[in-house]
Amino acid sequence: QVQVVESGGGLVQAGGSLTLSCATSGSIFITINTMGWYRQAPGKERELVAAISRGGGTNYADSVKGRFTISRDNAKNTAYLQMNSLKPEDTAIYYCNVDSAYRDWWGQGTQVTVSS
């Protein structure tokens, strides 16, 4: 089994920055392929924010392009989400998802609140 733990959320003013981390454990015999960040705001569906493949290929939601950067450390099976120029509409619970060849795993989420 793989455990996924997010950290780095918090309260920040609009225009500020936060860096989220997604750490995995229990994956020593499992190859983690794609690592992705999703978010869910109150009353809304969970949506993809950014994802990164094992080879470093990335994709972003249009709403965060140019402001957010996803990266990963394959040796540590850890992913990061650098969030700059934060807006109140970025307020949500941010979840990390990691997948292997046969299944995926979710973390419990970390709250990001952006005040205006």
Image: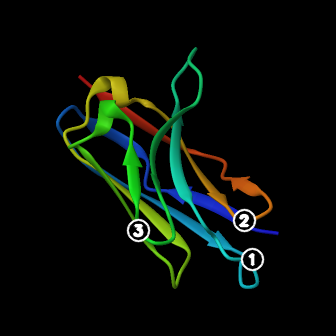
Disc 3 residue type? Gly
Q: Residue at x 40, y 29 (%)?
A: 91
27 left or right, relative to 42: right
Residue sitting nearer the eye, 11 or 57 = 57
- Asked if residue 79 is positioned above or below residue 116 in the image, the reply reads below
C-beta proximity under 8 Å, tags 1 and 2: yes
**Which of the two discs, 3 and 1, sits closer to the camera?**
3
Q: Which mark is residue 26?
A: 1
Q: Position of residue 1 (x, y in %)?
A: 82, 69
- Asked if residue 27 is positioned above or below residue 112 in the image, the reply reads below
Q: Residue at x 26, y 29 (%)?
A: 87
64 left or right, relative to 57: left
Q: Earlier in the sequence, mark 2 or mark 3?
A: 2
- Asked if residue 10 is positioned above or below residue 20 in the image, the reply reads above
Quadrant of the rendered image containing residue 15: top left
Q: Which residue is mark 3?
A: 56
**Which of the two discs, 2 and 3, sits closer to the camera?**
3
Q: Which residue is mark 2?
A: 3
Q: Position of residue 113 (x, y in %)?
A: 39, 33
The colour scheme is: rainbow
Q: Residue at x 72, y 65 (%)?
A: 3
